[in-house]
Amino acid sequence: MGVDMDIGEIDGACHCGRVRFRVKLTDGLRTARRCTCSYCRMRGAVAVSADLSGITILAGEDAIATYQFNTMTAKHHFCRHCGIYTHHQRRSNPQQYGVNVACLEGLSPFDFTEVPVLDGVHHPRDMAASGPRLAGYLRFEPAGQP
């Protein structure tokens, strides 16, 4: 991976740029992960962690829509204009946000050669589990340049 894992504070935006934010990550890019729950499977984003106080909306707060389902604990935020998911309040830790790496300035999910995938189908809050279980890894191996 060719990016700085120790990124502390970084700006982000949705696709159309209406929603802009600054985020202070809890442990740089080391918290990158995906999830197997029904929503995350369809969304397909790589998320990194921030405390609830770690995100400041710089513009477009009125453009942010929220989606909740099932237990209604997680709050998934997205731009109501372009539809891009920017961040969500986690069910596994409601004191944290997951932030879409693809929305962060200069970053891409394809910057990660390997991303852990957590078992969201068998969520630890639904079972007698002590924490999230690893379901596997998502790997990206760039092809040679044409």
Image: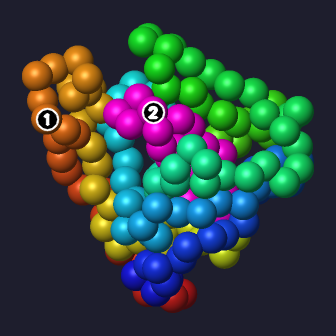
Q: Is 75 above or below relative to 146? A: above
User: Dot 1 corresponds to which residue?
Assistant: 130
Quadrant in the picture for residue 70: top left
Answer whether residue 97 is magenta in the image.
yes
Residue 126 placement (x, y as % from top left): 23, 18
Identify which residue, 15 or 97, lies in the foreground: 97
Residue positioned most to the top? 70
Report the residue at 42% width, 12% height from top.
71
Q: Dot 2, crowdedness within 10 Å: few (<14), some or many (≥20)?
A: some
Residue 56 placement (x, y as % from top left): 74, 52
Quarter of the C terminus within the rendering: bottom right
Q: Is 53 above or below relative to 108? A: above
Identify which residue, 131 or 115, lies in the foreground: 131
Answer whether residue 111 is magenta in the image.
no
User: Dot 2 corresponds to which residue?
Assistant: 94
Residue 63 placement (x, y as % from top left): 86, 35
